[in-house]
Amino acid sequence: MIPDAKLDRLVARRDELTELMSGSEMGDAQEFVRMSKEYAELSPVVDCIEELRTAQNEMGDLAEMMTEAGGDREMQALAEEEFTAAREKLPLIERRLNVLLLPKDSADAKNAIIEVRAGTGGDEAALFAADLFRMYQRYAELHGWRFEIMQLSEIGIGGYKEATAEISGKGVFARLKFESGVHRVQRVPETESSGRIHTSAATVAVLPEAEEVDVQIEDKDLRIDVFRASGPGGQSVNTTDSAIRITHIPTGIVVSQQDEKSQHKNRAKGMKILRARIYEVERTAKDAERAATRRGQVGSGDRSERIRTYNFPQGRVTDHRIGLTLHKLDRVLAGEALEELIDALIADDQAARLAEPG
């Protein structure tokens, strides 16, 4: 049970922000933005507190009616029925409030950079990586998010060795962060004449997009190599040295970017990816438990390290972390039923954090 004093402080703080923001002397625009953000975060919490207290007061009034009904059986029965309904509703409101009060991941509100790489399985793994990349693209479209392809390394038959995109919108990282890990596919390749089922894997990494204020990168810590972009089979894509390879010397992180014809644009995209990777390294370093989780999820791309299996012959998708199986493979890959998996993963994470002591 959450102490009333804590709830009172939250209600009082929102009232204080309302008064400050409506004041005519608000001259500092930056401070107004900060307060607006705090107000927006507090409002659903305070609304839930008010809903909880209304339900508690109703239960008190109904309990009083039940004792004062005297011989009026009809009045007493009605009061008992309403009291039972209010009592059943109360734990649901309390749980919702507890979830709202859970500590927030500071990166949840950020945009995300998603990287999909073919793992074990050759061409079939690259084709599966392309399927996953398109799944996230469709999911982003369904949410009205912006999906900008930053890097594609294709193979001749339509697969992707590696693909990177920036996804922008409200709460992108919060919804996609549990997609990081090894995804496994079981299906019969089109090139397989004997009809044998093959198992392949692809890795997905979802990184919160970092602003310049989040990560400070010194020019002296960068080594930048420029080279001519090449396509599948090694043929030259253009005749200028526009491709960029950026090495962050302190961490050893390397980013290559060659999709744009402009060296300047390739550098800008490369720096965005580099910043996100460094930011994620710093975040995981601050939280040892989360770092261990991420290592277990992303792995090396080996088919044995998996978080989810997509089984085509049976038309099912299984998320091994929560033991959930959906028999709607086509709809998951279309981005539609992916929502069910993500909702279940978020709910599981919330339940685990609610169960933590303290």
Image (spheres, grey):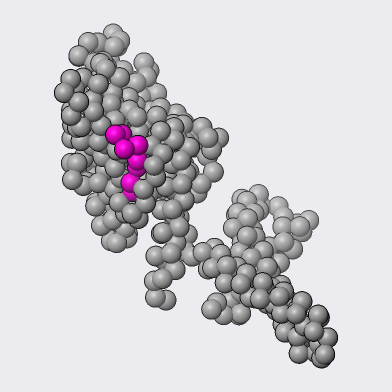
Question: Where's the C terminus, which quadrant?
Answer: bottom left
Residue at the (23%, 28%) spot, across then down: 188
Residue at the (41%, 59%) spot, across then down: 348
Give the mark count: 0
Q: Is residue 252 left or right of residue 214?
A: left
x and y percent of residue 175 in the render? 46, 47
Quarter residue 123 falls in: top left
Q: Is residue 163 left or right of residue 12?
A: left
In the rendered image, residue 314 lying in the magenta stretch gets the answer yes
x and y percent of residue 48 in the render? 64, 65
x and y percent of residue 313 in the render? 29, 34
Note whether residue 151 is visible: yes
Quarter residue 204 falls in: top left
x and y percent of residue 219 in the render? 31, 37
Residue at the (77%, 59%) spot, across then down: 23
Residue at the (29%, 61%) spot, across then down: 289
Please, which residue is most extreme toward the top here? 239
Write down the region rendered in magenta.
312-319
Please, which residue is most extreme toward the left here? 194
